[in-house]
Image: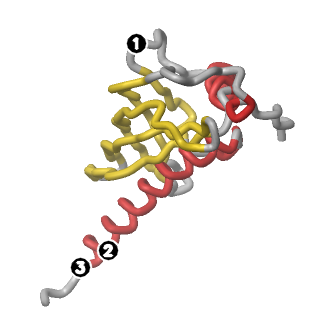
Amino acid sequence: MPAVTSEQVANIVDEHEIVRTINQWAQALDAGDFESFMDCYAPDGTMEVFHKGDPIATQEAFRAFMDLNVSQGAHLHLVCTPQVQLDGDRASAHSYVVRLDAYDDAPLIRAFATYRDEFVRSEDGRWRIHYRFVNRISFSSHGVDPSHPALIREPQPNP
C-alpha cells in the first residue's frame, strides 16, 4: 500500500469538514436553530431556490426562510451523496436531498432536490457556504393538509 501524503490527509479533513457543514445546515434548519444555521454561511453567503425569486442574502431573508420552514410542521431534510471538489481555499459540492414530512403517523416524501454549493474557507479555518443553489426536482402537497395536527408545530422561542 502506498504511503499517504500529508496533502491527501488535509484533503480528507477538508472534505469531511465540508460534509459536516452540509449536515449542520440541514439539522439546524429542521430544528429551527438560526444561530447554527447562519454559522454555515460565509458573511456574504447567499442561497437561491429554483423558481422562488430573488436570492436570499440578508439576515432578515434567512430568518424568514427558516420561520417558513419551521411553520410547516415536523419534517426532516435528509442530505446524501455529497460530492466535494476542492480548489485551494474554495470548494464546490453537489448533494441530493429528500424532505420527509410527518403525516398521519407515517412519513411522506414531500420533495426531492439537489444542492449545488460553493464553499470558502473562512478566516477561522471553517468551511462555510458562499452560495447554495437549491434545484427542486419535485415538490408535492398531494395528500397534505397544512392544518393537520402532525404538520403544526408550536412556535419555538428565539435564542
Q: Residue at x 66, y 23 (%)?
A: 68
Task: Please tell me whether mark 3 or mark 1 is closer to you in this view.
Answer: 1
Q: Nearer the viewer, residue 99 or 107?
A: 107
Q: Quadrant of residue 147?
A: top right
Residue count near mark 2 (Cα–Cα under 10 Å), binned few <14, some 14–19, many ≥20: few
**Which residue is farthest top?**
53
Measure the C-alpha gap from mark 1 to mark 2. 39 Å
Residue 29, position in %: x, y?
61, 39
Residue 30, position in %: x, y?
62, 41
Residue at the disc numbered 3: 5
Q: Is residue 154 visible?
A: yes
Q: Dots 3 and 2: beta carbons under 8 Å?
A: yes
Residue at the disc numbered 1: 51
Q: Nearer the viewer, residue 49 or 147?
A: 147
Task: Please tell me whether mark 1 or mark 2 is closer to you in this view.
Answer: 1
Amino acid found under the numbered disc labelled 2? Val
Amino acid found under the numbered disc labelled 3? Thr
Q: Nearer the viewer, residue 111 or 39?
A: 111
Q: Indicate the secondary structure of the residue bearing disc 2.
A: helix
Amino acid found under the numbered disc labelled 1? His
Q: Is residue 68 left or right of residue 109?
A: right
Residue at the disc numbered 2: 9
Decide: is 56 above or below 54: below
Q: Is residue 87 left or right of residue 17?
A: left
Q: Quadrant of residue 116?
A: top left
